[in-house]
Image: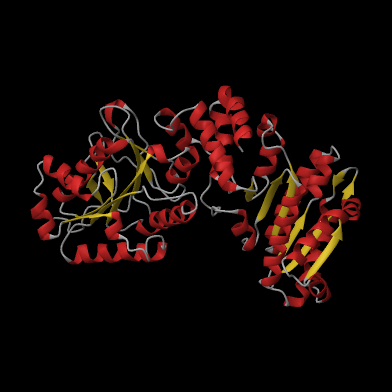
Amino acid sequence: MRDATPSNLTDCGLPGIRNIPFGVHMCHFYRGRDELAAVLVPYFAAGLRNHERCIWIAAEPLPAAAAKLSLERAGIDVDAALADGSLVLRDFSDWYGESTSLRGIAVVDLWLAEEARALADGYAGLRISGNVTFLTPETWPVFMEYEDMLTRTFSGRRIVTLCTYPSDGCGAANVLDVVHRHSCTLEHPDAGWQILTRIPAWQKESSIGPAGQGRTATCFAAPG
Amino acid sequence: MRRDHPRHASWQELLAAPAPGSHILQIYDNDDFVASGVAHFAAEGLTRGDAVLLTGTEARLRAVRRELLAKDVDYDAAVGRGQLSTFDLRRTVAALLRDDMPDADRYQVLADAAVDKARAGGRFSGVRWWGETPDFLHRQGNTAAALAVEDLGSAAARKHGAAILCSFLCDRFDPHGYDGILRDMCCKHSHVIPAEDYVRYRLAVNRAIAEILGEIKGPLLQSLLSWKGLACDLPSSQALLFWVREALPDQFHSVLARVKAYA
């Protein structure tokens, strides 16, 4: 008899990383538009293949129009995906109204509502990415609280999240803040990708997916 | 860093609403920062209905009083209703030490009595206690006693659900401290306030690390992620310096010198 329980794992889309668990909240530091497209295009292509609702909140240096072109170059029928609702592609400034941009709880609730809507519409889950280019030293601590909240709230949910940060805007202290507020960090050290994680006490070790190019990544089970 | 210590964004936020049982270290290099930090801790406590205990030198208590008055706190009224109590540091130390080391039994008797009196039969919702006893002992050359008092302070904070704040004079740019007193003191506390201006300190650390180590990626990122950190809530700027000391000792002195230049 076939198990009707949906898998807790899904394809990340990046070479070298097999599967990631739903509930994961990942981060990645990129340099420039090409590196950003190199991670987000395969990430969303996999989401569309897996029948997940994909929400790409774009920002410079890869705004929504450029992101659409990048997906099309990868052979994705973006117009069809946008039309049937499997893909939502918006610029950051359009997605977050001024009033909710940094109110953590409100934004988390918004994501949970999106998850519920996606599942009600028959999708396997929700796949999100946001490009974090809009912070100042003053707003940074508040946004880090929001990131913390996402990691805790998304744990165990049918949501996969990837937050991208420009490396030229992140000093070492910012990097430390970010990696400690995400389940794991995606790195692209060579031809393949790898997942780095510090395994907080509330996560358990398991054997999901090796790193690419023979490098050993520490992998993890779904939080919670 | 351990996740069970919630991270704080600013010392003002931390001292406004410290969790019961927390034991906070304020590292200072100027007296004004002590007075303003302690006054903030005390004023917020008084506003929130906590009992506030202050153990310091006469000069320090006077400075804190001035700061509280500048914040429009009715100091004398708070003392009068038993919500604010002060203790002389030298008398406290004399009562505490036996053979130059703190006596655990004496400490417990003193702490229990002070907290019981401060609670005033439940009139005040919580207890906040600031002190500079370890700072005084360390400056007297008795570092072992200073660290032992911190252990007793942690136990008292847990036992009474009190929030304890310790001010400690320390040069965070002295490389020896990262293997000695600075590290030891951080590890004795639940939260650490390493600098008065968090944003400035962060920018200085970021700039120094960028210049000496370059971008945090590849092996550096792996090292940072696998670093166990200190078992306290420490702002990332200060945590990074401990990481550099452990993971990249050859570059530590250069990084710290640049941070000092930029901070």
Residue B2 placement (x, y as % from top left): 53, 47
The answer to whether residue B149 is left or right of residue B59 is left
Quick check: can you spot residue B230? Answer: no
User: Residue at image x 17%, y 59%?
Assistant: A123
Depth check, front residue: B256 or A94: A94
The answer to whether residue B252 is left or right of residue B81 is left
Quick check: can you spot residue B29? Answer: yes
User: Residue at image x 43%, y 54%?
Assistant: A143
Residue A109 placement (x, y as % from top left): 34, 66
The answer to which image quadrant residue B23 occupies is bottom right
The answer to which image quadrant residue A61 occupies is top left
Residue B82 placement (x, y as % from top left): 81, 73
Quadrant location, the C terminus of chain B:
top right
Residue at the farthest top position: B250
User: Residue at image x 83%, y 40%?
Assistant: B139
Tally of numbered discs:
0
The answer to which image quadrant residue A82 occupies is bottom left
Residue A1 placement (x, y as % from top left): 13, 56
Colouring scheme, one of rainbow, by chain, secondary structure, one colour: secondary structure
Depth check, front residue: A84 or A10: A84
